[in-house]
């Protein structure tokens, strides 16, 4: 795959605003309520509403990040705690390496691309919204999986997975588009998990329980055979 090929459409990174626009919609009601309760003299209730406004703005924050390393450096696709590191069997029966990141409601929920690549497929599956600690969640929860091909033909996947609170997955790229490493490409509302599936032979540089930051933390490095 040659990323310099002018025939390959380029994905325009988004969202890029400091606070994702969803915050304006979801924060409008509690902000208005705070104003009404304040005028009525219900100060305590007004402060609770303002707290909700602050929470919504914090949840949808979208900080800029410095992307480290080179084209074989795998960066974190999300902020959160590394919850899964290990070998899995893909749907095709092949072996692969998976690194999963759990996001709490207090983490940044904008997702970033771990490696540069062209989107080969986008698959939406699942129908449940089970808690992340439920073993069935991995297979039954609503998810969006992007399959990509990077430089030198390396194949990898990124999965956005809902949780008990998360109810909406936003994924902007289209099949055929080239997405740069570290580019912001979507988000999951209110708690979730994001997985990266890499070729075997990749060098894992994180461990379970470690906190990572999307785009700026290094998860792994592709092996030379990948």
Image (cartoon, rainbow, N blue to C red):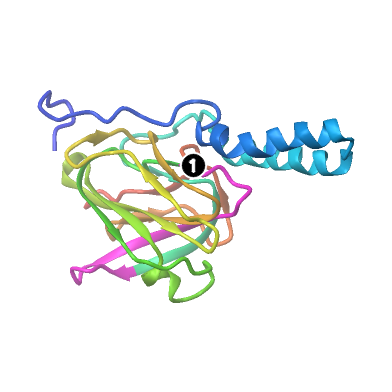
In the rendered image of this protein, does residue 219 appear above or below residue 89? above
In the rendered image of this protein, does residue 88 appear above or below residue 40? below
- From the viewer's perspective, tell me whether residue 39 is left or right of residue 92: right
Tell me residue 139's x, y (percent). 37, 71
Under tag 1, what secondary structure? loop
* Label 1: few (<14), some (14–19) or many (≥20) C-alpha neighbours in 10 Å: many
Tell me residue 184's x, y (percent). 40, 35
Tell me residue 131's x, y (percent). 53, 68
Q: Which residue position is annotated with label 1?
A: 214
- From the viewer's perspective, tell me whether residue 35 is left or right of residue 112: right
User: Residue sitting at 16 percent across and 45 percent down?
Assistant: 153
Tell me residue 182's x, y (percent). 39, 35
Magenta-tinted stretch: 88-110
Query: Would residue 94 be counted in the magenta stretch?
Result: yes
Residue 135 vs residue 56, the one in the foreground? 56
Residue 216 vs residue 70, the one in the foreground? 216
Query: Would residue 10 be counted in the magenta stretch?
Result: no
User: Residue sitting at 56 percent across and 32 percent down?
Assistant: 24
Q: Where's the N terminus, which quadrant?
A: top left
């Amino acid at each position: 795959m040659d990323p310099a090929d002018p025939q390959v459409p380029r994905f325009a990174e988004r969202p890029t605003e400091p606070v994702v626009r969803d915050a304006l919609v979801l924060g409008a009601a509690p902000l208005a309520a705070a104003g009404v309760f304040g005028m009525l003299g219900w100060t305590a209730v007004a402060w609770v509403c303002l707290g909700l406004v602050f929470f919504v703005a914090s949840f949808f924050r979208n900080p800029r990040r410095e992307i480290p390393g080179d084209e074989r450096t795998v960066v974190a696709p999300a902020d959160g705690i590394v919850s899964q590191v290990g070998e899995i069997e893909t749907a095709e029966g092949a072996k692969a390496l998976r690194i999963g990141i759990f996001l709490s409601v207090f983490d940044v929920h904008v997702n970033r691309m771990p490696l540069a690549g062209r989107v080969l497929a986008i698959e939406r599956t699942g129908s449940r919204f089970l808690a992340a600690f439920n073993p069935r969640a991995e297979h039954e929860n609503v998810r969006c999986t992007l399959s990509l091909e990077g430089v030198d033909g390396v194949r990898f996947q990124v999965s956005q997975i809902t949780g008990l609170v998360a109810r909406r997955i936003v994924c902007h790229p289209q099949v055929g588009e080239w997405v740069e490493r570290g580019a912001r490409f979507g988000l999951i509302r209110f708690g979730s998990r994001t997985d990266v599936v890499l070729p075997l032979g990749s060098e894992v540089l994180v461990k379970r329980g470690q906190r990572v930051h999307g785009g700026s933390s290094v998860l792994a490095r592709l092996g030379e055979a990948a």
